[in-house]
Amino acid sequence: MKTRVLVLLTALGLGACATGSLAQPPVGGVDAQPKGDDAEQKEQRQQSAEEAAAARLEAAKKAFGGEFPPMAQLGEGPLKQINIHPLFDESYACTPHPVGQLGMAGDALGTDCVVLGPTRVGERLFFVIPFRNDGLTNEDWLGWGEPVLAPFDGEVIGVSVNPIINDPGLLGPPPASLIIFRRADGVRLVYAHIAEPKVVAGDRVKAGQPIAVVGNNGVSRGPHIHIGAWEEDTLVPLEIRHDLRVMGELAKARRERQRRPQSQSVPAAANDDK
């Protein structure tokens, strides 16, 4: 039970920060470290790891346009907000990064989101737990592989993939796999820790379009998506809001699909060849 609680707290942002910086390793480095090598093997492994890390960082920089964003410029007064299309066509919860926790544009005021659903423990049924069993495999997590939906109508300006898949509860090497979007008004938004991107730089997307699935990579302790947004010209970070009207429409459609008899929701196989 202690293991379950620890992983749950981490995933919801109540333990160690679930995302950290988009590009920088946490203090103390990553958790997953090989053991048992002799000195020569360790040196070779270290060199290979450093070369791979440098390549991943360069790919992420390219996705951002050549350099990682500088520090966000928060300023005084009320926080600016952006209202985006729901991240998933499922129930989910997000933990925001408060002012001062993370500083880089794309991190500042960002939020970490996990899919939630009913999970049975013995005879008890829970609705706010993001994983089945003990959560120690990615497949335990309800959001693992869940389609990720585009935040707004706009352009994909960068995509970067970190192929290393983390084990839940252990941090991996940065950077996270990323998709960066730009809206017509100059707002930029990043999804981090995605997997299997379905778009490339230059693609136009519509709000709600599936563009990737949930992954677990980079500075992450569990399958989730980090969202960060900022104004391109001013570097002012934006507080993330989710369109609750659209979220309600998606939930209604899910309920209708669940009530619909299977014979009505799935076309008869006999008709496929006609």
Image (cartoon, rainbow, N blue to C red):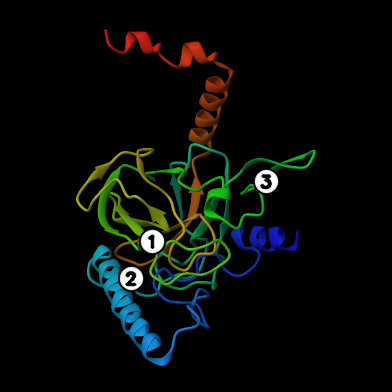
Q: Which residue is mark 3?
A: 128
Q: Nearer the viewer, residue 8 or 249?
A: 8
Quarter of the N terminus within the rendering: bottom right
Cα distance in 3D space between marks 3 and 2: 34 Å
- Residue 69: which numbered mark, if any? 2
Q: Which residue is mark 1?
A: 230
Q: Nearer the viewer, residue 144 or 205?
A: 144
Residue 60: image quadrant is bottom left
Q: Position of residue 47 (x, y in %)?
A: 32, 84
The amino acid at mark 1 is Trp
Q: Residues within 10 Å of mark 2 (few under 14, many from 20)?
A: some
Residue appearing at x 50%, y 83% in the figure: 36
Residue appearing at x 54%, y 59% in the figure: 222
Q: Are marks 1 and 2 in contact (CB under 8 Å)?
A: yes
- Compared with 157, 243 (above or below) is above
For discs 3 and 2, the disc positioned in front in the rendered view: 3
**Precedes in sequence: disc 1 or disc 2:** 2
Cα distance in 3D space between marks 3 and 1: 30 Å
The amino acid at mark 3 is Val
Cα distance in 3D space between marks 1 and 2: 10 Å
Dot 1 lies on which element? strand
For discs 1 and 2, the disc positioned in front in the rendered view: 2
Q: Position of residue 57 (x, y in %)?
A: 31, 73
Residue 61: image quadrant is bottom left
The amino acid at mark 2 is Pro
